[in-house]
Structures are given as structure tokens and as C-alpha cells.
Amino acid sequence: MAEIRIENLHKSFADFVAVRQCSLNIADGKFVVLLGPSGCGKTTTLRMIAGLEFPTSGQILLGGEDVTYLRPRHRDIAMVFQLFALYPHMRVRQNLAFPLQNEGLPRSEIERRIAHVAEILRIGEILDCPVGGLSGGDRQRIALGRAIVRHPKAFLMDEPLGTLDAEFRELMCVELRRLHNQIGTTTVFVTHDQNEAMALADMIVVMNRGDILQADSPERIYNFPASKFVANFIGQPAMNFLKLDQPVRCGTAMVRVGGAQTAVAEPLADAAEGLLGVRPEHVAFAADGPLAGEIVTSEYFGSHHITTVATSAGPIKVHVPKGERPLMGSNVRLKFNSQRVVLFDSRTELLIPNRESVQKGACHV
């Protein structure tokens, strides 16, 4: 196991900047997810850590050793790809043994490691099966097994669940987290799927256009997103954003939106133009709610409804328990959970910190 540290990492392809002066510490034994839309720089960052791409500038340290310009075989890392990268003409046992044979390990040690990995991944009964006839989930386990048998300092995973269907993805998320808890090897996992990130990560690193926007725990990223982009990217459905009627003043416990006043956690900075952010589950129907509106749509998801209410502040999505039946065209009043409302500066789109976010150490980058 080893700490991974990148310092001022920068990668350009001619005039295109893929990764822009990024710095990040990945603690020994942590499961870290690089998350963001296509083209945000997450895969390029992973490939530089792996040694498949060299940075334009910056430094990469693995366990304190500078590996910035070392070839992959000299970094003691194992990588799992989206397309498994298995040898179809070999059986499962041969696929697992291949990297160990290349290292020149004795046969007894190879067999011991294969037996151990087969037990961890529960693939003992298919060790002598051809790879070609196996399910996607089994082939993903074998790809993981081939990485695990090497006992590397770190695992790097480039969207390894991307080709699986929804049921297998959910199953493999559980398996990956169980596996990490059991082995404890430092892991860097790339995905564009926020559900995978929230389910797996000790720390999520949100990227966009080559920049790291926020690196924090899933809970803090969800509750205290560092920017409007992060708030919009994390959460299904996305956070509601409402323009404030007046400037934000430091220490003010009330703001006005759509002509109605609502309580907020006291902001610690001013903003000439503010934006209120609140997630649908932190909005509720209440007779004494300050904001009036009309129900215009309602989507049923079995366990709950997602209802859209047209208000003077704009459309607001509300998470409604399944026991309630929102009626189209009904007039309702809305109330926000003041401790879960966040404020953004409209000009910079950055979070305006409040006392709770500071106390919880949110918005680390």
C-alpha cells in the first residue's frame, strides 16, 4: 500500500489542456473516485499516475518515490480497464497466472496466490473454465483478480463497470467495496457515474475541464458542494437553484427569494448577487411555508414522488414520500430545511461558506 501524491500536474495536447495544474493527496489505503463528465481530465490524470501518459509538467509521487517519468512496469501498480483486457484463448487460471509468470515467481507461490484470490473473489469453481463463455460479471472479477495477485502498491481502475448492465453494476459496486475493505490497497477509480462514486468512495474528486473542483468525502460533497457545477452534477434529481431577490450579507439568517423570506444557515461572506441551492429532499409541503406554488408535474418512482412546483422563484422539485399523492394543479406552500440550504455567489458560482460547512471541513480542494 502507498500514498499517492500529485503536485501541480499539467497535461497539454498541442493547444488543448487536458489537466490543469492539479494537486491531490490520496492517503494510503483509501478508495478515491475521480468523477466528472466526458473530457473533464479524469482518465488523463489516471493514465499519468499509471505511467501510460507523461505529464507536460508537475510531479507524481507513489509511496514517497518520484515516479513522474517512470514506465508503468517500474511503478508497482495494477490497472483494471473498462474492456477487461483478458486473454480469450486462456482459461481463467492461466489469465491469473500470466502476470506472475512474467515476474518469474515460483510455481508454488503462483498457485498460492491464485487460490487466495479465487477465495476472495469467489471464482474457485470457474478457474479451469475458458474465459470466452463467462458472463460480464465473472470476467470483471477475473480482471480484478489478475490485478490483485500481483500485490501492487495501488490499484488504478478506468471505468471498469462501464460495459456492465445496471444489475451487474450494482452487484459489482458491492463487491468492489467489500474487496477494498478486505484488502485495503490504495485505489483510484475513474467514473462518470455519480451513483458508483457515492457508493464506493472514501473521497470523491470532482473534475471539470481539466480542473479539480472539489476533493472531499461523499457526504460533504453532497451537503456542501464547493460550486454550482458540483451541486448540479451530484444528486438525482439535481439541486434546485433559485435567484435571490437581494444581496447576501455576512451573518444574515434570512434571505428573500421569489418575494418570500426563508431562513438559512448564516453565511460567512457577502455576495452582490446570490443563488440559493436546496435539494428536493430538503423541500417539503407545509401550510405555513413562505413560498406558494402550483404542482405542474409529478413522477412516481415507487418509493417516492418527484414533484415539480411552479413558484414565483421558478420551478422547484420536491421529494414527496410515497404515502402522499400530489395532485396536478393543486396549490401548495413550500418550506425549506434551513440547515440544508446552501448559498452560491452568482458571479463566481462558488459556495458561500456558512458556519456548519466550515466546522465540518467542507470544500477541500
Image (tube, rainbow, N blue to C red):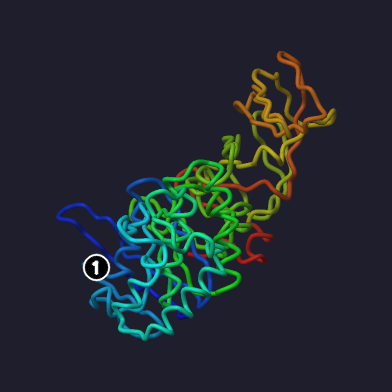
Q: In the rendered view, would you say 274 is above or below 124?
A: above
For this rendering, which residue is in front, 331 or 261?
A: 331
Residue 268 visible here:
no
Q: Amino acid at mark 1?
A: Pro
- Rendered image quadrant of residue 5: bottom left
Give the residue furthest to the top.
329
For this rendering, which residue is in front, 205 or 48?
A: 48
Mark 1 Cα within 10 Å, few/some/many (few <14, many 20+)? Answer: many
Q: What residue lies at 52% left-to-right and 67% top-to-bottom? A: 31
Residue 185 visible here:
yes
Circle 1 sits on which residue?
55
Q: What residue lies at 56% left-to-right and 69% top-to-bottom? A: 120
Say left or right for 339 vs 110. Answer: right
Residue 249 image point, x, y percent = 62, 50
Give the residue furthest to the right.
287
Q: What is the count of numbered marks? A: 1
For this rendering, which residue is in front, 71 or 37?
A: 71
Residue 297 image point, x, y percent = 64, 20
Q: In the rendered view, would you say 120 is above or below 279?
A: below
For this rendering, which residue is in front, 107 or 31?
A: 107
Residue 223 image point, x, y percent = 63, 52
Q: What residue lies at 44% left-to-right and 50% top-to-bottom? A: 134
Residue 53 image point, x, y percent = 24, 65
Circle 1 SS class: loop
Q: What residue lies at 64% left-to-right and 41% top-to-bottom? A: 278
Give the residue furthest to the front.
128
